[in-house]
Image (cartoon, rainbow, N blue to C red):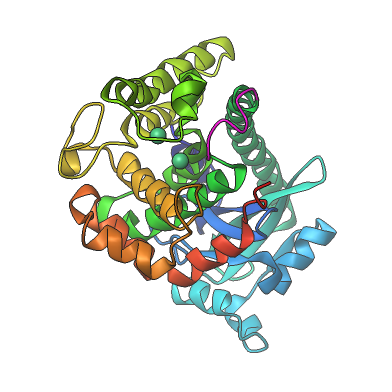
Amino acid sequence: MTLNERLERIHDQIQQSCNSVGRIAVALYDDKTDILHTFLSSSEENPFHNYQIPLSQVPSLNMLAMSGENRLISDIPASLSDSNSHHSKQIVGSGYCSSLTIPLKLQGKLLGFLFYDSFEKDDFSVTMQGTLNLYAQLICETISHDLASIKTLRGAVVTAREFSRQRDEETAAHLSRMAHYSRLIAMEVSDHYQISEETIEYLHQFAPLHDIGKVAIPDRILLKKGRLTDDEREVMRSHVLRGVEIIDLMIDEFDLGTVRHIELLRNIIAGHHERFDGSGYPSGQQGLDIPVESRIIAVADVFDALTTQRPYKPAWSFDEALTQMQTTESAFYDPACVAALAKRRDDVEAIRRRFVDPPAD
Ligand SMILES: [Fe+2]
Ligand SMILES: [Fe+2]
């Protein structure tokens, strides 16, 4: 069962005693970027689909994050008269009249916010708030348990990669940038390809693991300065299947078989060198037969490689990279994913500025 399905179940339970609660939603917070982004919603009636904003730009939530207190708004339309907040307007536009917002914290760290929205004014009695607080804790723990499993997995991978540091150009900054690009692309194409917000979060979390198989490639090939021979290229390409083997082993060793969306992780590793026209490897899958997560990662990964300085080439500008991906190499990539990057230019540039490679020595 996905987290979102769990949330829907909890919503059903709550509605048995309070049927005017129309929506439960969770937004997650990333303290590295200060970005708060939508994650789960129990209702189709969701005014904030695929939405993200720096927490510092939402003073009311920022205050809750600091105080740790809940916020009860018993009459949203009335409270709107003294608020120009875009958020409140969105909420009212969807017919919600009162809301309870709970900051989700774990060991003092902000995980995100939980929102209960109701179609009735004054809907949250003191007893009701007590119950909803308990549910909030349950939801918080479920989410953090899931995210912690991924963290363990990522920790294991980072450790493995530490042994081979300096071995290739996959810097920590590259992995952060491509993970963020992946999220942007996924958000843009989510309606088109029906990708849930939950899936987008996992895609973002798993993206840095795409090249884990490179730990199995010998230095003489991975670090070779000149052109690879045909045989060497074959060995290099085996990093994809080795990656799948490694991750399967780690899932066994760390007992992570219960991590949700593990299939998504496998597809990210297995499919990140497939090409839209079928000329990629290892399977030569084509077009929409390639899982959408693989298509997204491929675009994010290549775009970052193009816009980053490498020993053999300077960093290309946003426009240069995009032109290359939309002309000479256009057949390789899902055009919707490339178009998504083009559309989010400002966000892409912000990510480039935020995660900068350390200067080469
Ligand atoms: Fe790769
Ligand atoms: Fe990469």
Report if residue 232 is visible in the image. Answer: yes
Q: Residue furthest bottom?
A: 81
Position of residue 329 in the picture relative to residue 352 (left or right):
left
- Which residue occupies 47% across, 17% down? 246
Residues rendered magenta in the picture: 163-169
Residue in the image at 64% along x and 31% along y: 148
Where 244 sits versus 28, above or below?
Answer: above
Image spot of residue 177 (x, y percent):
53, 52
- Kindly give the residue lying farthest to the front in the view shown: 226
Is 293 drawn above or below residue 309 in the view shown?
Answer: above
Q: For the point 35% across and 20% down, which residue is it? A: 235
Side (left or right) of 118 relative to 330: right
Indicate the quadrant containing the N terminus: top left, top right, bottom left or bottom right.
top left
Give the quarter of the image for residue 56.
bottom right
Q: Main secondary structure of the magenta part?
A: loop
Residue displayed at 64% across by 36% down: 144
Q: Is residue 325 magenta?
A: no
- 65 or 132: nearer the eye? 65
What is the number of callouts on the image? 0
The percent position of residue 211, horizontal first and vertical second, equals: 46, 32
Q: Nearer the viewer, residue 206 or 26?
A: 206
Picture coordinates of residue 232, whole percent (x, y): 34, 22
Depicted 123 relative to depicted 277: above or below: below
The percent position of residue 107, horizontal first and vertical second, equals 81, 40
Q: Quadrant of ligand 1?
A: top left
